[in-house]
Image (tube, coloured by chain):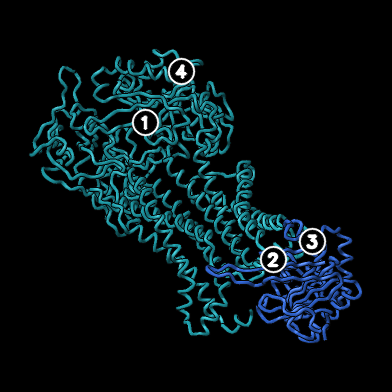
Amino acid sequence: MIKLRNIDRYIDKRLQRNFILKGIDLDITEGDFVSIMGPSGAGKSTLLNIIGFLDDANEGEYYFLDEPVHGLNEKQKSEYHRSYIGFVFQAYHLIDELTVYENIEMPLLYRKVKGSQRKSMVADMLDRFNIVAKKDLFPNQLSGGQQQLVGVARALIGSPKLILADEPTGNLHSDQSKEIMETFKKLNKEDGVTIIQVTHSDEMASYGDRIINLQDGAVTENNPYEEE
Amino acid sequence: MFRNYLKIALRNLKKYKIDSFISLSGLAIGLCCCIILIMYVRFEWSYDNFHKNKDSIYRLTEQTVNSRNNEIRHNTVHPYPQSIALKEEFPEIKSLINISGGSAQFLKDGKYILEPIKFADPEFLSEFTFPLIFGDSKTALSNLDNIVITESAANKYFGKTNVVGELITIRLRDEPKDFMVSGIAKDVPANSSIQFNFLLPFENQISSASAKEQKTLRESWDIGFLETWVTLNEGASKEELVAKFPAFLESHYGSGRVERNQIEYGLQPLSQVYFNEDYRSGVTQSSNKSYSLILGSIALVILMIAGINFMSLTLSRYTSRNHEIGIRKTVGAIRHQIKFQIIGEVFITCSFAIMLGIVLAELLAPFSDVLFQKELNLSLLSDPILWISVLGLLIILTLVTSLYPAVKVSGKNVTSLFSDDRSAQKIPMLIKGLIIVQFGLAITLMIGTYVMQGQINFILNKDLGFNPENVVAVEINSELQNGLVLGMLYSQEASKITGVLSTSITAAQYRDYSEYGVTDIGMAQLMSATTLTQLGDGIPSEAVDAQYLETMNIELLTGANFSKQANSFPSDEIIINKAFVDAMGWDNPIGQILEDKPENQGWVGPFDGKKVIGVIENYHFKSLYDPLQPMVLQHIEAVDENPGTILIRLSSDRMSKTISNLKSLWNSIAAQEAFNLAFMDDMVQRQYNEEIRWNRIIRISSMASILLACFGLFGLSALVAQRRIKEIGIRKVFGASIKNILFLISKDFVLLVICGFVISAPVAWYLSNQWLTDFSYKINLGVLPFLYGGLTVLLIALTTVSWQSVKAALQNPVENLRNE
């Protein structure tokens, strides 16, 4: 599903080139549940952003569903965002001015889903995450865990093939974290959604079936646990 | 989707209440001011547009050059025989209409009331567009004893409008006479330069005079008292007619006079009358075009300032919405959807503000007459031009405001939208530029206001050479046959009243002539022709009595005043002013005898053979628009003239008691005459009414523009303080005092205001100088108005910014840091 070849991401300072990612080769197949781990500043988030088309690599090749991403224009990228990729962020990134219902509904608006259909889809989602009672509240009226549930619901409403989660549990306490992770695991097993998450926590990483370790912008270990 | 945008827009407005209030109400107020000002400018520009023939009715104008100082003089007044000659000699003239202004006393409930009237030839009503409600335009003025009155005049005198055929008693001169109302005219629109309530056939102007005077008026080519208006036959060209005037002048005035005074005749279309202040006239009003241009520019400046507020606040708010845009992008919004959202949101808020502004203007319009001192009767909502320009404004403002953030934000990469953009904490360059422009404009206006104020104060406080304070002028009808006896009697009796310091009579009529478009109040108004080239094209003079100098506090430099003994004055004595002495180059003026007798001509100047007995200090008998001129005082009994004004100097205490005594004295001496009393200092001040009025309009507008600019600054500084709240918190934790924080936030803004000042100072200097050239007596443009203007605005701006800075500085740093 995802094929990265020799990906470089760097920032040019006056005399010096700072590499955030250097020579990344990575293959992820459909149905994987991958955790990217590594110390702060290793380039985890940047890698995730590149995979999610939020950021562009400076060098290298990236194939998404065998389609070269480096050749896509903005409109095509948006098309992929709408139909294939869902994002979950550490800081939730909900729109403060919209209610829970409206936040979840928003991706459908960009996909031009009809009103009645939209209603039932959002209702399903609210049901599934047990947040029907909260649908008219604004994000700042919710706890962190609840906000993240809304974030996940929003990511799932477009029934994406791939979910990219940047430290989804970073701001949550362990019970909430477990709840989110169980949800991911269920999605992965039952619906076959590919999930890539960035995390610091071994416990969270263990929900996945593959771990990629990043250090100083390079993959140091692929699947450290599998080899045991 | 659209509903989603609308929701976001409204919730954002709600969330940032202060910002939204400032940007919306600022734009609304600015637009409201702009609409009202522009409406007034349009009113000024609409003068005389309602006349169907506005481009084909011409006024005959005369331009002469004063041989004394080469000053160009403009004149609209012509002698009667010339009108007849014109009509006879030029077949291309279709109709020639003589018009003159004057006043007459109208009998109402047993008392005579003085009213301004117009005399006009019968064609007046058919050539000009002054429709009659009752009566026939063609014949209404053909009978000598007919009168046309306006609707409101009919209501005033008869209590109803259809009064055709009724009689009204009028004293044109001394004798009362009945006139028959032959037509009721619609009230003259406010934007007509010719205003009238009463219209009499022109012949009355001449036939009401004494037989001797009638002969002079009918035959003399030297006495101008009427305006000549013409319309031309079809196919006749104005230019060709004007080209024939030099020959006409030569044949009637002689080539010597035409050449010496460089007389030129021209034809001025009615449409150009109002804005031509060169030709001040007693028939038409005129106004200074540059004022309406200034006001129009101020209106645009205000609108610009309000627009800039709106823009800078909206722009800076968008930088704080990067986050939302980022989210929208990750869920699949494409670029043009983001653009559309931003543009749409701005459009909605903008149209909301504009609607608010229109409603505000509509509510305030009735009160604008107070500011402009004219009755405009604005009808805003039915005005298509308003709607079209407002629509244009909406589109322009929306595009200008939204295009920059739309393009910039929508093009940004999502990761940079999510990252805490440090540049968002600073004021973007574009906004900085806008603030500089804004304050530059505001400071320019402020400096201009100070300069105007300074000049007006200078004029009002200038030593005029006479002291108008505590002097009242009592009007006396100079046409009364026993006027001189009556005037002297009243003057004598009045001087016995306690509180009266001295009294004097003069032949001139001191009055506020401003409604005739004349700034002078009637002092030394009589112009006598002269052949003395040192004195230019005429000698202004006034016939007064011996108490005149004392009553007016005019200083006698050398020589003697007129003798105060009754009947002991020789009729050849004159008093002249210092300017006269200077013009003649006399070392020893006392005893000089004027020679004003041209060679080989029968004509003799009126001051020929007069002996100078005294020299007085120059005094400003004309308004300060005109420089000092040589002038002559004569004794009123020597020239056989009737008094027009009784001047009374009062002591400053218990003035109202004295005045009521003066009134009862008047009623016992001249019971049938209305008592009209005016203060001289009021009259002098009213000469500058236009300037004072415009100064007020411009001062209020510039205050509005500064307030609006500060409005924007307030919002912007709030935004900056909000955004730097974390920085402020950190600084406070590490020991920054409130003063430090204040300085930190304020310094950027103060710098911008100073930049604005640097740009505006030369502009203001240039504009102020331009305005001042109109005055003969003016202030020196010093540093002070600039200093005041700059400091005022800086102070207001600083206060505005400090408000926010103090608020930010006083907040508990722990709270701010925890929030992040």
Q: Between marks 4 and 3, how big is the CA–CA gap? A: 78 Å
Q: Helix or strand or loop: what does disc 2 sit on?
A: loop
SS at circle 4: loop
Residue B72 horizontal side relative to residue B377, left or right = left
**Gap in Å between the C-alphas at discs 3 and 2?**
14 Å
The chain ID associated with circle 3 is: A
CA gap, disc 2 to disc 1? 96 Å
Mark 3 sits on what residue? A80
Residue designated by label 2? A55
The colour applied to the residues of chain A in this rendering is: blue
Q: Residue at x 56, y 49 (%)?
A: B35
Image quarter (top left, top right, bottom left or bottom right) of the C terminus of chain A: bottom right
The numbered disc on residue B237 is 4
Q: Is residue A177 visible?
A: no
> What is the quadrant of residue B93 in the picture?
top left
In the image, residue B378 lies at what x, y percent? 57, 45
Residue type for callout 1: Arg
The residue that label 1 is drawn on is B173
Q: Which label lies toward us, 3 or 1? A: 3
Residue B759 located left or right of residue B811:
left
Asked which quadrant contains residue B565, the reply is: top left
Disc 1 element: loop
Q: Chain B in the picture: what colour? A: cyan
> Of callouts 4 and 1, which one flags the residue occurring earlier in the amino acid sequence?
1
- Residue at 52 percent across and 45 percent down: it is B40
